[in-house]
Image: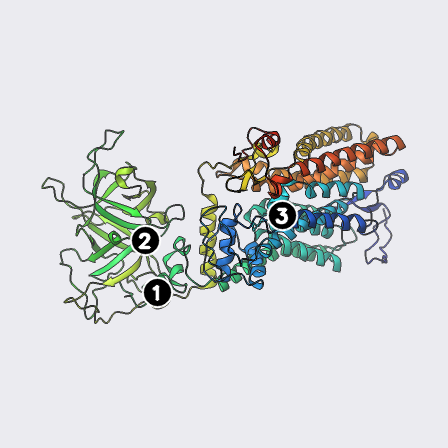
């Protein structure tokens, strides 16, 4: 069939061929084939983005500000995780390095506001929740940004609903879910980053919808595309929790591009440009934003602090003060006579540990098993700096001597012995099963019991990683494996000194097990680096006159710091935390079973307890399965009787597109947590909860559109919605003493509010 040539449209778009028509259908622009004039006439036109929405938007925003900002400075004590975040903000302002499992952007925002308000000189050394802030702490400013982001959730959710094609009525229902949910209000009013993260996520959703509604490679398309990438990057730079939602948004953009291929007015060359553009905005823009936040992070935090021990020795030495002050000027080359501390590169669960020994010996027999030990001196990995962490490097067959003149340096593959500095015993391993890992060999400091067990104290230094090209073992900069060798056959034993991560029982003081094992030789648990280093003195002199080089201040590149911190954050995020009193899981989230105690006043029942609005949460728990069932029924109906579907093809496509986005957003932020091997908390559910609230508004809108055409049906639905909204507001007000901590409730009043046995209000007589 011959088609008319496309003509310029006043909006800048090309008119489609006569046999098809483009309509807005939610997250994607769908081409609808023209089958009949009647079908075209029922195509739904989306409401204007501005007409009639200004007044409800303004009223909802004012109400949002009131619910989030009221009594923002109360209580004037540390609430819930403010214990950590206020400390992080304080350290940001004082440029002290800290470690957190989440990226830094949210904390950077709060720290900027706090710095402008003069925060940072206070001595904020919080020990526990409830500790008072200093009198000159600008509490309101510290809590202001999270509160503002929490308030901004309401207009953003309203705009998302209009972008999905719904009217003021449905959009207001959506916004009210966010406005009157007690859990979201509580989470928005303190020095926390959940509201910041959630608002940035919803802004990314809003702009990705607007991006997919615009003409290919138009100015507005480029603008909304870049805004989508920006807010995707900012959200993932605030919490890794955003990743699930970003996968959904990436799918929306991919699907939009796939549908765009069907537009015959767009040339193949333009399609390739469009493909490169959305790859740029979905991948490179968020990645660039993410990296930029860490660049600022390292630029600001250049001083050592209490958290830098979780990083590598080189990372610590690159910070001002701390380890750098200790190691500056210490000898660089490890030599015969070097006194060293050996730090395990991997540590245990991001906890540092050093090779350690002490006077205690392994028990003759291990309790609960029939296995015995060598009964020799214990060797462990200890998480604290201690005098028992010091070892002396010596050449086999030579006496320990001081270092003078040119040091007798240790090179790659040299065989050495390690002498424990305090006890004077040699590091040893032999064919005896390790206490906690019987598949590995025991490591000891050798004790001569005058029996047939000969010492096996030779170890080969194997350099694995270092920056310099030489083969010399260096302090701080070199990572080595220490390979056990037998006395007569040094090449036949691949047993590497390693940490298993298992804690020894009480007889081992809860320190970590050290073994000799070939099973661990491929992992970082078998890598060690020298942290502190000095040469053995000559003739009692305090200083040694040697020709060896000394350590210079460590200058790590941004990328070295960035990659190391990413690895450490990933490791900490994967840690499985033991049961927590306020831990919860996906099943509890759906039923609103687990609240969280944020704060309690000493001696009274005044408290802040985070719990969701029961009416909204139960509505959401009903709407999700109903939506899935109705969609399945209509999909089967459409497959069997396509001509009798009670909605037009355009309306059906819009319903499918919006439902796909909202259901995927909810399920990705809920179902995936069933496969998460770590302790979960209430706030992990917030992104899923946001999509559920959007789905409630969408469901109300579709019901209203189907049943509200008649005068009676319209007024009945309006009445039901008013009743529902009044119930929502009543529940919000009923639990407001727990949301804001503004009233002291009696024991009986608290019991009446405790609608679920799993809610654990703090009730005092």
Residues packed near mark 1 inside 10 Å, few (<14), some (14 to 19) or many (20 plus): few
Q: Is residue 468 left or right of residue 678?
A: left
Q: Considering the numbered disc 1 on the image, is that residue within a helix, a strand or a loop?
A: helix
Image x and y of residue 229, in percent: 64, 55
Q: Secondary structure at mark 2?
A: strand
The residue under the point 80% across, 39% down is 651
Mark 3, secondary structure of its residue: helix
Separation of residues labelled 1 and 3 (CA atoms): 41 Å
Q: Residue 487, how many percent across, how many down?
A: 17, 48
Q: Which residue is mark 2?
A: 343
The answer to whether residue 666 is seen in the rendering is yes
The residue labelled by disc 1 is 325
Mark 2 Cα shell of 10 Å, populated few (<14), some (14-19), many (≥20): many
Compared across the picture, whether 366 is left or right of 231 comes to left
> Disc 3 or 2, which lies upstream in sequence?
3
Residue 198's label in the rendered image is 3
């Amino acid at each position: 069939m011959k088609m008319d040539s496309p003509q310029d449209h006043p909006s800048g778009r090309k008119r489609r061929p006569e046999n098809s028509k483009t309509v807005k259908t939610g997250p994607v622009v769908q081409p609808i084939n023209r089958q009949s004039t009647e079908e075209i006439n029922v195509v739904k036109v989306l409401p204007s983005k501005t007409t009639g929405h200004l007044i409800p938007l303004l009223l909802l925003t004012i109400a949002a500000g009131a619910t989030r900002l009221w009594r923002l400075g109360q209580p004037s004590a540390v609430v819930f995780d403010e214990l950590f975040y206020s400390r992080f903000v304080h350290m940001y302002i004082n440029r002290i390095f800290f470690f957190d499992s989440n990226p830094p952007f949210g904390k950077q925002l709060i720290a900027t506001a706090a710095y402008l308000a003069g925060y940072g000189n206070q001595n904020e050394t919080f020990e526990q929740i409830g500790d008072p802030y200093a009198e000159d702490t600008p509490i309101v400013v510290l809590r202001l940004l999270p509160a503002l982001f929490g308030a901004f959730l309401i207009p953003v959710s309203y705009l998302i609903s209009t972008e999905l094609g719904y009217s003021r009525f449905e959009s207001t229902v959506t916004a009210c879910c966010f406005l009157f949910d007690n859990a979201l209000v509580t989470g928005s009013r303190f020095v926390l980053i959940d509201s910041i993260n959630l608002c940035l996520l919803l802004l990314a959703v809003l702009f990705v919808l607007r991006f997919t509604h615009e003409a290919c490679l138009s100015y507005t398309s480029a603008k909304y595309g870049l805004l989508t990438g920006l807010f995707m990057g900012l959200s993932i730079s605030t919490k890794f929790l955003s990743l699930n939602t970003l996968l959904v948004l990436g799918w929306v953009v991919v699907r939009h591009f796939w549908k765009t291929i069907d537009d015959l007015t767009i040339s193949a060359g333009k399609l390739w440009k469009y493909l490169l553009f959305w790859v740029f905005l979905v991948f490179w823009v968020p990645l660039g934003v993410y990296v930029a936040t860490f660049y600022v992070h390292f630029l600001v935090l250049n001083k050592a602090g209490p958290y830098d021990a979780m990083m590598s020795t080189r990372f610590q030495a690159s910070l001002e003060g701390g380890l750098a002050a200790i190691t500056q000027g210490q000898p660089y080359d490890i030599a015969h006579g070097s006194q060293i501390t050996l730090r395990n590169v991997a540590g245990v669960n991001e906890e540092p540990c050093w090779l350690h020994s002490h006077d205690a010996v392994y028990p003759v027999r291990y309790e609960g098993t029939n296995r015995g030990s060598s009964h020799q001196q214990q060797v462990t990995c200890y998480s604290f700096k201690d005098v028992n962490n010091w070892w002396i490097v010596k050449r086999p067959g030579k006496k320990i001597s001081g270092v003078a003149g040119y040091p007798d340096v240790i090179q790659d593959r040299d065989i050495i012995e390690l002498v424990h500095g305090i006890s004077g015993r040699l590091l040893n391993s032999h064919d005896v099963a390790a206490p906690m890992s019987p598949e590995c060999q025991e490591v000891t400091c050798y004790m001569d019991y005058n029996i047939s067990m000969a010492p096996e104290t030779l170890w080969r230094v194997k350099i694995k990683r270092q920056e310099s090209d030489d083969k010399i073992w260096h302090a701080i900069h070199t990572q080595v494996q220490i390979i056990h060798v037998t006395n007569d056959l040094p090449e036949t034993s691949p047993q590497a000194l390693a940490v298993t991560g298992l804690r020894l029982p009480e007889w081992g003081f809860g320190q970590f097990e050290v073994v000799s094992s070939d099973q661990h030789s491929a992992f970082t648990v078998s890598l060690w680096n020298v942290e502190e280093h000095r040469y053995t003195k000559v003739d009692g002199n305090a200083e040694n006159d040697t020709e060896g080089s000394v350590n210079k201040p460590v200058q790590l590149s941004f990328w070295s710091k960035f990659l190391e911190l990413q690895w450490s954050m990933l490791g900490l995020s994967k840690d499985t935390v033991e049961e927590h009193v306020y831990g919860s899981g996906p099943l509890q989230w759906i039923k609103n079973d687990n609240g969280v105690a944020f704060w309690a006043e000493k001696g009274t029942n005044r408290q802040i307890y985070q719990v969701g609005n029961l009416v909204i949460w139960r509505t959401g728990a009903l709407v999700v399965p109903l939506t899935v069932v109705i969609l399945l029924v209509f999909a089967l109906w459409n497959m069997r009787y396509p001509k009798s579907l009670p909605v037009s093809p355009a309306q059906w496509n819009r319903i499918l597109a919006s439902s796909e986005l909202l259901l995927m957003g909810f399920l990705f932020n809920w179902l995936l947590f069933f496969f998460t091997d770590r302790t979960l908390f209430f706030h992990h559910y917030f992104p899923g909860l946001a999509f559920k609230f959007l789905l409630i508004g969408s469901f109300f809108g579709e019901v209203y559109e189907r049943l509200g055409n008649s005068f009676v049906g319209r007024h009945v639905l309006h009445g039901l919605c008013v009743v529902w909204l009044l119930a929502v507001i009543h529940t919000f007000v009923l639990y407001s003493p727990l949301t804001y901590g503004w009233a002291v409730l009696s024991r009986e009043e608290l019991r009446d509010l405790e609608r679920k046995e799993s809610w654990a209000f703090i009730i005092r007589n």
